[in-house]
Every structure is written in structure tokens, then in C-alpha cells.
Image (spheres, rainbow, N blue to C red):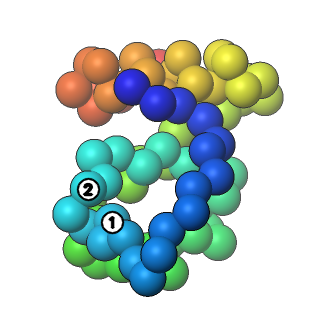
Amino acid sequence: MFDGYHPAKIKDELALSDYLYVCAIPERYKRGLEKPIPPEIADRVFYLPQDGLGIWDWSERVYDFVADGKGGIE
């Protein structure tokens, strides 16, 4: 499983609808990102509380969310 920010080089395009499993976004960005997200992937986008977590704790929170079958975060 890969977490975090990973720059990639893509020629032409990458159809996220074919490959995206989960997209986890800190909930504080929800208002600005909800509209531009294409409808075909909207059901795989989740806004999770970040609570000031650093990158390692945030990555663990996202991993746990996915590992729990996308169960809620307390």
C-alpha cells in the first residue's frame, strides 16, 4: 500500500475511475474540492478529520480507515 504524496509522470491521461480505490482528503478542504470531483469517482472520495496530525499519523489514520473497510473514524 502506498501512502502520502508521490509525484508521477503520466503520458496523455490516467483514468482515475478505472484505478482509484480510495481518495482520502482532510475534511477542512471539503468545501473547496467537492464540486470539481467527477461524479464517477465521488463515491470513493472520503473527507476525514485531520485534527492537526502530522504526515505519519495522518497516513496511519487513512490506512486504518481503508483497512477497516472504510469504516468510520472516531
Q: Calculate the distance from the C-alpha at mark 2 to the C-alpha at mark 1.
A: 5 Å
Residue displayed at 55% across by 48% down: 25
Q: Are marks 2 and 1 in contact (CB under 8 Å)?
A: yes
User: Helix or strand or loop: what does disc 1 sit on?
Assistant: helix
Q: Is 22 situated above or below 73?
A: below
User: Disc 2 residue type?
Assistant: Tyr
In the rendered structure, the answer to whether residue 64 lies left or right of residue 6 reads left
User: Disc 1 residue type?
Assistant: Leu
Q: Which mark is residue 32?
A: none
Q: What is the quadrant of residue 41 in the picture?
A: bottom left
Residue displayed at 56% across by 63% down: 9
Residue at the disc numbered 1: 16
User: Helix or strand or loop: what does disc 2 sit on?
Assistant: helix
Q: Which mark is residue 19?
A: 2
Nearer-the-camera pick, 9 or 42: 9
In the rendered structure, the answer to whether residue 17 lies left or right of residue 4 reads left
